[in-house]
Image (cartoon, rainbow, N blue to C red):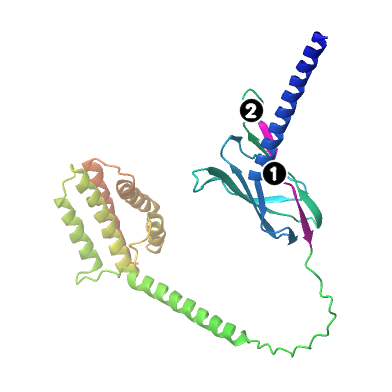
């Protein structure tokens, strides 16, 4: 009999413990649900309009905040602000986050609950408390159901500007500008062209005097060798240009040899002239430094050609 009474007392204690635990759990769950707030600024929207969803939970016992899923059926997350801490006068704290959502599917849809993790009782696993799900009605803009007749709006007179003559004037101005620029270009080119040197001496006497002055150069100095040959070529171009009434200073050696056809000199003399002129080109452009004998030989050949040319022109 005593054993039966002890067993009954033991069973009663177990039921009391289970009942108290269940009650405490329900109280805790109710408390969390009361403090976990889900606030929306609207629940009826047109397609594409936005809803501000504010989630708020106490900091006490909070171990893990909401993790938004990558996608939610029928909804799009436009913006998720960072969670922020709110301080109250009683020195308690809460965490708050604002999420902007929208929908492009017409109909009534449920925005799902989102889990928040709180610390459980000592020795128990953490408690998961879900936010409140809520319905959202998504619709198109309402059609005009009044069927009222609208006034006919008057015709709007549109003024059209004719750009034809403007285009013509622009084209004429552009043509005049191009003509002016071309005139300036070619006129400047003519002015920039070097004039044929004019001397009181005859072409022959001027050339002979200039060739004689070349004897003053030091043909052992590289700089003077180069200047010597530049002047040697210029003396011949000046002489031939004055004889033919042309400006030959910009002509190449090939051009000068072609011009010599008018003089009708023997081929051997033309060949010697070509050798002398090509030597001056090599010194001027290829930095070639001939021996002093070669430089003197080039001067003698050009002097001989000038004399033959002078003789031919006076005795055709």
| Residue 31, placed above or below residue 186 | above
The image shows residue 154 at horizontal and vertical percentages of: 74, 90
Instruction: Give the magenta-colored segment's residue range.
Output: 127-139
**Whole-percent x, y for residue 41 in the image:** 66, 58
- For the residue carrying disc 1, how many other residues have a C-alpha within 10 Å: few (<14), some (14-19), or many (20+)? many
User: Residue 267 at what x, y percent from top left?
Assistant: 40, 52
User: Is residue 129 within the magenta segment?
Assistant: yes
Q: Quadrant of the N terminus?
A: top right
- Circle 1 SS class: loop
Residue toward you, 84 or 315 = 84
Rendering quarter of residue 160: bottom right
Name the residue: 72% across, 24% down.
17
Q: Is residue 311 visible?
A: no
Q: Which mark is residue 131?
A: 1
Magenta segment includes 14: no
Name the N-terminal-most of marks 1 and 2: 2
Q: Is residue 314 above or below residue 294?
A: below
Vertical position of residue 77 compared to residue 146: above or below:
above
Q: Relative to 165, is 67 above or below?
A: above
Q: Which disc number belongs to residue 121?
A: 2
Q: Position of residue 266 (x, y in %)?
A: 38, 55
The residue located at (26%, 59%) in the rendering is: 235
Residue 181 placement, left or right of 197: right
The CA span between labels 1 and 2 is 21 Å
Q: Nearer the viewer, mark 1 or mark 2?
A: 2
């Amino acid at each position: 009999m005593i054993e039966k009474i002890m067993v009954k007392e033991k069973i009663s204690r177990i039921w009391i413990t289970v009942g108290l635990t269940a009650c405490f759990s329900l109280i805790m769950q109710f408390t969390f649900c009361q403090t976990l707030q889900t606030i929306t600024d609207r629940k009826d929207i047109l397609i594409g309009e936005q809803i501000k969803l504010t989630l708020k939970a106490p900091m006490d016992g909070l171990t893990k905040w909401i993790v938004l899923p990558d996608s939610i059926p029928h909804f799009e997350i436009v913006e998720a602000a960072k969670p922020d801490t709110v301080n109250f006068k009683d020195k308690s704290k809460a965490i708050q986050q604002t999420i902007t959502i929208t929908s492009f599917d017409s109909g009534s849809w449920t925005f799902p609950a989102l889990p928040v993790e709180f610390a459980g009782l000592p020795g128990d696993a953490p408690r998961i408390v879900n936010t409140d799900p809520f319905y959202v009605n998504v619709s198109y803009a309402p059609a005009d159901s009044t069927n009222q007749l609208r006034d006919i709006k008057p015709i709007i007179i549109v003024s059209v500007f004719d750009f034809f003559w403007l285009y013509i004037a622009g084209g004429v101005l552009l043509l005049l500008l191009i003509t002016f620029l071309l005139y300036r270009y070619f006129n400047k080119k003519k002015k920039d062209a070097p004039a044929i040197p004019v001397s009181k001496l005859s072409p022959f006497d001027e050339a002979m005097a200039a060739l004689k002055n070349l004897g003053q150069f030091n043909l052992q100095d590289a700089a003077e060798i180069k200047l010597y040959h530049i002047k040697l070529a210029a003396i011949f171009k000046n002489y031939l240009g004055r004889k033919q009434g042309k400006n030959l200073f910009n002509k190449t050696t090939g051009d000068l040899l072609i011009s010599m056809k008018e003089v009708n000199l023997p081929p051997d003399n033309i060949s010697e002239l070509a050798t002398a002129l090509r030597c001056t080109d090599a010194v001027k452009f290829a930095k070639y430094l001939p021996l002093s004998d070669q430089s003197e030989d080039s001067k003698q050949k050009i002097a001989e050609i000038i004399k033959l040319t002078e003789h031919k022109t006076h005795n055709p």
